[in-house]
Image: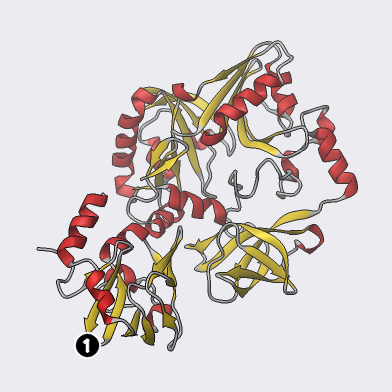
């Protein structure tokens, strides 16, 4: 068990590689109750949500989910988030556990609208069911037609008799669902999901495999690929920025960055020489320090050592020979296309 | 009965040493491999390297992290376990046997007396949990 933002969480249950493979080939369960939830309500809830996030909240339909960024005025990330449109006057925002209080304070500080902001983390537990057998596992416990929930949509319904918000979202690169339930029901739901998934080979999955799964799918992790010093453009997340939607926090800084050009950009790489790149290791271009590794790990699916790094923007394209300094030795690597892993549909 | 061989000596950093004359075999303990999880890479010194007690001799990496291995004794490396380069996962299966790390010619055999006995180490990892 490790302390993760004040939560005691297992790094692994049966082993990182075993758990990782279960999610890629069958189904895995994640207790992600540490994730934070913030509710924005009121006649101008949409205006506040649009003003504090980078993506276009106005384009969301009821029941739709959107990946987005909360930025500071200078264009760096406060957090990356999921915005769920519950109703025209109600948005449900899922945020990173360790950023929850900061996010809540940030959104409140920008609230000059007819809207209320609630730090609602204590009212929700979250269980993620991920993998090719996630749907058949979860379907045993709910009357909701799960196949009818499209990717990045959600439905409010019941799972094993308890009120649940079921979103077809995830942090693994696999099909699956993230289920928000009252904390009092979470332990029972976990046990019932483990039973329901037994015939499909369900495994509980810890933080270790959560990281390798999201890295293969090139999903950002706050504190690694993104933080207060990194903009969405640098993090290769231009698709979550809608500059044409009207004013929002950080927009001026992003416009300026777009005009003047990026200094650095995120790019994927795989090791060619022996060794595993780790977070914070130096990256060399033509023998000179040029960037740093944000995440690095063996990839259990690809059987390669992979990573993400920041490089000068003009160099951040696939096919560049680079080196990663591993324990004072430069080790060969090459930049590659991402995501490293994409599921067959 | 302890799973830690009585003829080994141990460190609080979870290395073991098996001494025969002025030669010692060094490895990591079963407790260490369990704490690390799936081991995917092992970085060892070259034959001829001089080890200094307490200094890093190399590293063992699991999927999730890198851990230094510290020399439990001082001396010169006479042999490294080359099989671990291709089969690092052997460390998860047989850390006290086939997956030894290096063999060392001791430069100061008296250092061994300062290491933990199997009983002391068993008590130590029991208390650590």
Colour basis? secondary structure
Quadrant location, the N terminus of chain A: top left
Relative to A124, say whether A267 is above or below: below
Q: Badge 1: few (under 14), some or many (20 or more) residues near its Cα, within 10 Å? A: few
Q: Residue B22, how many percent across, how many down?
A: 26, 87
Residue plotted at (43% across, 55% down): A20
Q: Is A170 positioned to the left or the right of B15 in the image?
A: right
**Furthest residue in direction right, as rendered:** A259
- Indicate the secondary structure of the residue bearing disc 1: loop
Relative to A59, say whether A89 is above or below: above
**Quadrant assignment, res A57:** top right
Q: Residue A274, how many percent across, how many down?
A: 53, 76
Can residue A62 be seen here?
A: no
Mark count: 1
**Furthest residue in direction left, as rendered:** B1
Q: Which residue is mark 1?
A: B21
């Amino acid at each position: 068990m490790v302390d993760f933002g004040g939560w005691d969480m297992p790094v692994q249950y049966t082993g990182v590689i075993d758990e990782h493979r279960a999610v890629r080939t069958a189904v895995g369960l994640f207790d992600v109750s540490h994730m934070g939830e913030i509710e924005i309500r009121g006649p101008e809830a949409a205006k506040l949500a649009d003003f504090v996030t980078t993506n276009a909240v106005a384009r969301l339909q009821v029941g739709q989910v959107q990946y987005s960024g909360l930025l500071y005025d200078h264009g760096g990330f406060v957090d990356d988030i999921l915005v769920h449109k519950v109703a025209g006057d109600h948005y449900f925002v899922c945020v990173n556990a360790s950023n929850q209080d900061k996010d809540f304070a940030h959104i409140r500080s920008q609230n000059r609208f007819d809207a209320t902001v609630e730090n609602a983390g204590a009212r929700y537990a979250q269980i993620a069911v991920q993998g090719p057998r996630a749907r058949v596992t979860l379907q045993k416990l709910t009357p909701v037609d799960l196949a009818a929930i499209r990717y990045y949509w959600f439905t409010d319904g019941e799972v094993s008799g308890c009120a649940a918000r079921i979103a077809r979202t995830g942090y693994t690169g696999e099909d699956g669902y993230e289920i928000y339930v009252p904390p009092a029901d979470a332990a029972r739901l976990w046990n019932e999901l483990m039973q329901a998934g037994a015939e499909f080979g369900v495994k509980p999955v810890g933080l270790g495999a959560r990281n390798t799964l999201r890295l293969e799918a090139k999903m950002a992790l706050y504190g690694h690929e993104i933080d207060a010093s990194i903009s969405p453009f640098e993090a290769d997340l231009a698709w979550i920025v809608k500059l044409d939607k009207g004013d929002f926090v950080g927009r001026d800084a992003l416009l300026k960055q777009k005009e003047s050009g990026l200094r650095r950009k995120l790019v994927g790489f795989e090791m060619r020489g022996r060794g595993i790149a780790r977070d914070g290791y130096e990256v060399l271009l033509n023998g000179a320090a040029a960037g740093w590794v944000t995440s690095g790990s063996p990839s259990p699916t690809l059987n390669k050592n992979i990573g993400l790094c920041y490089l000068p923007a003009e160099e951040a394209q696939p096919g560049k020979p680079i080196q990663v300094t591993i324990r004072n030795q430069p080790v060969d690597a090459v930049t590659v296309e991402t995501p490293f892993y994409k599921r067959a549909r | 009965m302890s799973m830690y061989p009585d003829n080994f000596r141990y460190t609080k950093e979870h290395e073991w040493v098996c001494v025969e004359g002025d030669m010692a075999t060094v490895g990591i303990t079963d407790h260490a491999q369990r704490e690390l999880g799936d081991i995917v890479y092992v970085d060892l010194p070259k034959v001829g390297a001089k080890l200094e007690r307490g200094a890093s001799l190399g590293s063992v990496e699991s999927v999730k992290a890198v851990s230094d291995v510290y020399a439990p004794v001082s001396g010169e490396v006479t042999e490294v376990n080359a099989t671990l380069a291709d089969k690092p996962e052997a460390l998860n299966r047989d850390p006290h046997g086939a997956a030894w790390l290096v063999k060392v010619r001791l430069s100061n055999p008296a250092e061994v007396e300062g290491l933990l006995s199997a009983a002391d180490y068993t008590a130590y990892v029991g208390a650590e949990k």
